[in-house]
Amino acid sequence: MAQYEIIKTEIDEFKMDCIHFGNGKIPMVIIPGVSINPIAPMGASVVNAYKIFNDRYDVYLFDRKTPMPKEYSVYQMSEDTVKVMKKLGISNACIFGTSQGGMIAQYIAINHPTFVKKLILASTMSKMNEVAKATFNKWLELADKKDYQGIKYAMLTDLFSDRFIEMYGKMFIEMQPEITAKDCERFITQVNACVKFDCYNELEKITCPVLVIGAENDKVLSADASVEIADKLGCKLYIYKDYGHVVYDEAPDYKERILEFFES
């Protein structure tokens, strides 16, 4: 397995971790979606999942900042991510943003175009829709009740395909780390940021090449959210059949599709 490191960056009043790996010279930034737990313990699995990029790319997967304030918008998340990119000397990067990470990536491309060479927006949205509203309200209700088991179950049933749930659902629930009160607060903050997110009318400011990838059975944001972005930008769009929100973790050809776009 390829080697990796956890870079712990301190800027002013906050810290941000990232998983760093790869032997190449092309900067690649991965911005993940809403997470209950910090990403650092996932280093080995991330490197294995993205090993196809190891030889040509210098890869950074960014977490959110800590401490995370209760009120923390997607725009603020994007600005803090750019601050860390600047400190690490990353610019003109190939950026892959998933779910809320795709929302963050849109703001980076809108407000800091020199930091983005190419952009992939995966299972994300540019503004709220009814499917997303229902999903986020359900998650917030579970979190407010501190129904940690309910949150784990929702993460399984809302994010993954029926095929995955049937084959690995029980294992997924059993392998999830315990959720603490602090984890729950972090989760609530991120979900609230999604609820308030809307950059649709600023999308025309994105000038780099963009690929939008969605999933037909996305129960979190809907496939229509991906179509909406692609129509607004007039960019490439690919919708996977028979997959759910985290198609980027399930579809066997997904990483090759990312690589093909970045290399084209």
Image (cartoon, rainbow, N blue to C red):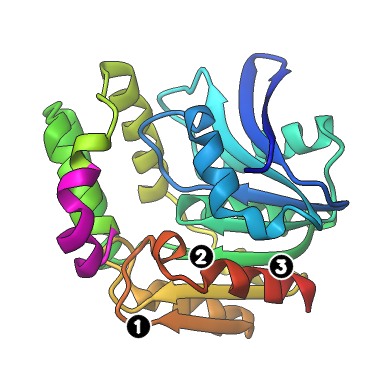
Q: Which residue is mark 1?
A: 241
> In the figure, residue 21 lies in which quadrant?
top right
Q: Is residue 25 left or right of residue 94?
A: right
Residue 251, percent from left and from top: 43, 70
> In the figure, residue 118 lies in which quadrant?
bottom right
Residue 90, percent from left and from top: 83, 43
- Residue depicted at 73% across the width and 40% down the height: 82
Q: Three-letter amino acid code at disc 3?
A: Ile
Name the element at disc 1.
loop
Distance in Å between CA atoms under marks 1 and 2: 14 Å
**Among the two numbered marks 2 and 3 on one chain, the one whose residue lies closer to the N terminus:** 2
Q: What segment carries the magenta color? A: 160-172
- Residue depicted at 22% across the width and 69% down the height: 163
Q: Residue furthest front?
A: 1
The mark lying in front, picked from 1 and 2, is: 1
Q: Which mark is residue 122?
A: 2
- Residue depicted at 60% across the width and 54% down the height: 50
Distance in Å between CA atoms under marks 3 and 1: 27 Å
Q: Three-letter amino acid code at disc 2?
A: Ala
Q: Is residue 180 magenta?
A: no
Q: Nearer the viewer, residue 129 or 176?
A: 176
Distance in Å between CA atoms under marks 2 and 3: 16 Å
